Every structure is written in structure tokens, then in C-alpha cells.
Image (tube, rainbow, N blue to C red):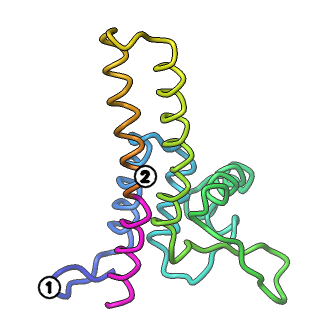
Amino acid sequence: MLLPGGDRMGEQERWQTAERLALALTEGGLQRMSARTLAVFLFTDAATVTMGDIADRLGVSAGSVSGAIKALLSVSLIERLPAPGSRREHYRLREDAWPTLFSTQNTVVHVMLQAAETAIATTAPDDPAHERLSRMRDFYTFLLGELPGLLRRWQEQQTSR
């Protein structure tokens, strides 16, 4: 890994950085093994990796990596690739991982919006809870309206690079 100024980061330092990133991701809510597995995808020099590759890198069993792979596949951060001539399944971080993940989070936004709307229906207009819940609903409605444009602008920025 090249560092600013052209220096090369040592392999051990590189993977220590990956583990620190995994810890930050865990603190952000990701399951520990999923976070460590994602860090492998982010820091690997290989075009694709197998569960065995990840298990070797992390010093864990391939079985423990299996659930992390399923979790990362389910949110579209990684993708399974055909590997002609190989009996092992190969995976890689999706090129569009971050906007795809952000798009799939719309489900959470919809849940929050629906919860606010349901709660508003149980409160009187002069109830302070009604006003707070209305602000919650309005925020999530605004957010849903802004997401498509935000993602479009991201794509345009990436295309112009």
C-alpha cells in the first residue's frame, strides 16, 4: 500500500490498519466477523477472495467467515463471481458497494416514516407528541425525496473522474 509521499506501508502495518477499521465498523454497529471480513475486502490486493483466503488472513475457521459472507452479500456490499476451473466460490467488493448499501438503507427510512405516521394517527393535533412525530415524519419524507438526487449526483461525479 502506498502512503502519501510514495512510502510503502509494511504488510503488518497494513493489516493492523485493517483491524482498526474493522473495530471502528464494529463500534458503528456491524457484527465483528462481518466487519473484519469487510476489512479484508477493502485491503486485499487480490481481485477476488475465497472464504478460505479470508479465514487464513483473519486466522479463523472458514465456517466462521460463512455468516459474514452471507451478511455482506445480503446488503450488496460484495458479490459472488464465477471462477471457471475452481471449486471454491470467489467474492469481491462491489464497485458500487457504497451507493448500493445507502440505497438499501431506504428500507430503514421507510420503516421510520411508517412508524411516525402510525404514531401520529394516535395523537391529537394539540398533543406535543403529535408535533414531534410530525417533525420525524417530515424529516424522513424529506430524506426519501433527497436520496435519488444525491445518488444521481454521486454517479455523475464518479463518471466525470
Dot 2 or dot 1: first in sequence order is: 1
**Majority secondary structure of magenta residues:** helix
Q: Quadrant of the C terminus?
A: bottom left
Looking at the picture, how far across and down is residue 158, in whole percent?
Answer: 37, 83
Looking at the picture, how far across and down is residue 87, in whole percent?
Answer: 85, 77
Between the C-alphas of marks 2 and 1, the distance is 26 Å
Q: What's drawn in magenta, residue-wise? A: 147-161
Q: Is residue 94 above or below residue 24?
A: below
User: Is 73 displayed left or right of 34 in the figure?
Assistant: right
| Residue at 56% across, 55% down | 104
Question: Residue lying farthest front?
Answer: 125
Question: Residue lying farthest left?
Answer: 5
Q: Quadrant of the N terminus?
A: bottom left
| Residue at 57% across, 48% down | 33
Q: Are marks 2 and 1 in contact (CB under 8 Å)?
A: no
Specify the amino acid type for callout 2: Ala
| Residue at 46% across, 20% down | 120
Within 10 Å of disc 2 (Cα), the crowding (few <14, some 14-19, many 20+) is many
Q: Is residue 86 above or below residue 56?
A: below
In this rendering, the count of numbered labels is 2
Residue marked by disc 2: 22
Q: Nearer the viewer, residue 92 or 54?
A: 92
Q: Is residue 52 above or below residue 27?
A: below
Task: Assess whether residue 151 is covered by the magenta stretch.
Answer: yes
Residue marked by disc 1: 5
Q: Is residue 120 above or below residue 41?
A: above
Q: Nearer the viewer, residue 125 or 137?
A: 125
